[in-house]
């Protein structure tokens, strides 16, 4: 499965890079993340609780960052598994300064999924992936805005889903 897209975040590129490289803050952005811990330089282990249609489960895995060029881009490899299947993939994340307080985040990746999770169907998995990415970026926007005024953003699955819907609605009226 191919995943690609772009999102605008209301912060300088250096702040977005710092957010994406802080495991404690990053763990609050990932939908369903129960744990994210450092294994070594640029290597993490985590646990995520995800449900897609009737297939729900806890997945454990590793994330390895490679070819980092701060604050521009990086490559990632992910490998995870749970009772409901496995996920393996690789991707890139590129940050482009669009204005002093705006960063364009471009992401692209290729993901392989197997096990009972595949029974859900490609369309359902694509929709779930897009929704999770939307929730992630909505949470990132809230975190960046709160951090700019010295606060910590409230996070939660329902709150981030609401933020995702608001961002989606606003994107229909956004002018580039």
Image (tube, rainbow, N blue to C red):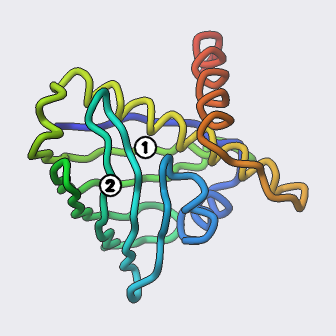
Q: Residue 85 placed where, x, y %?
A: 16, 50
- In the displayed image of the protein, which residue is found farthest to the right? 149
Quadrant showing the N terminus: top left
Residues tagged 1 and 2 counted as in contact (Cβ below 8 A)? yes
Residue, disc 1: 106
Q: Say left or right for 105 vs 98.
A: left
Residue, disc 2: 92
Q: Dividing the picture into quarters, in which one does residue 19 lie?
A: bottom right
The residue depicted at 53 percent of the width and 49 percent of the height is 96
Q: Residue 33 placed where, x, y %?
A: 48, 57
> Could you tell me how many numbered marks the image carries?
2
The residue lying toward the viewer, choosing from 72 and 33, is: 33
The residue lying toward the viewer, choosing from 21 and 176, is: 21
Q: Residue 14 placed where, x, y %?
A: 64, 63
Quadrant showing the C terminus: top right
Q: Residues within 10 Å of mark 1 (few under 14, many from 20)?
A: some
The residue depicted at 63 percent of the width and 34 percent of the height is 158
């Amino acid at each position: 499965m191919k995943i690609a897209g772009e999102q605008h975040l209301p912060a300088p590129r250096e702040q977005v890079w710092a957010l994406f490289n802080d495991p404690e803050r990053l763990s609050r952005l990932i939908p369903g993340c129960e744990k994210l811990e450092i294994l070594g330089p640029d290597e993490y282990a985590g646990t995520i609780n995800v449900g897609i249609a009737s297939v729900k489960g806890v997945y454990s895995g590793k994330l390895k960052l490679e070819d980092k060029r701060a604050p521009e881009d990086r490559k990632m490899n992910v490998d995870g598994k749970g009772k409901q299947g496995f996920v393996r993939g690789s991707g890139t994340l590129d940050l482009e300064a669009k204005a002093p307080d705006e960063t364009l985040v471009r992401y692209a990746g290729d993901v392989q999924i197997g096990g009972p999770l595949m029974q859900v169907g490609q369309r359902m998995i694509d929709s779930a992936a897009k929704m999770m990415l939307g929730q992630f970026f909505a949470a990132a926007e809230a975190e960046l805005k709160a951090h700019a005024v010295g606060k910590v953003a409230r996070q939660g699955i329902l709150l981030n889903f609401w933020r995702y819907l608001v961002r989606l609605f606003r994107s229909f009226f956004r002018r580039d």
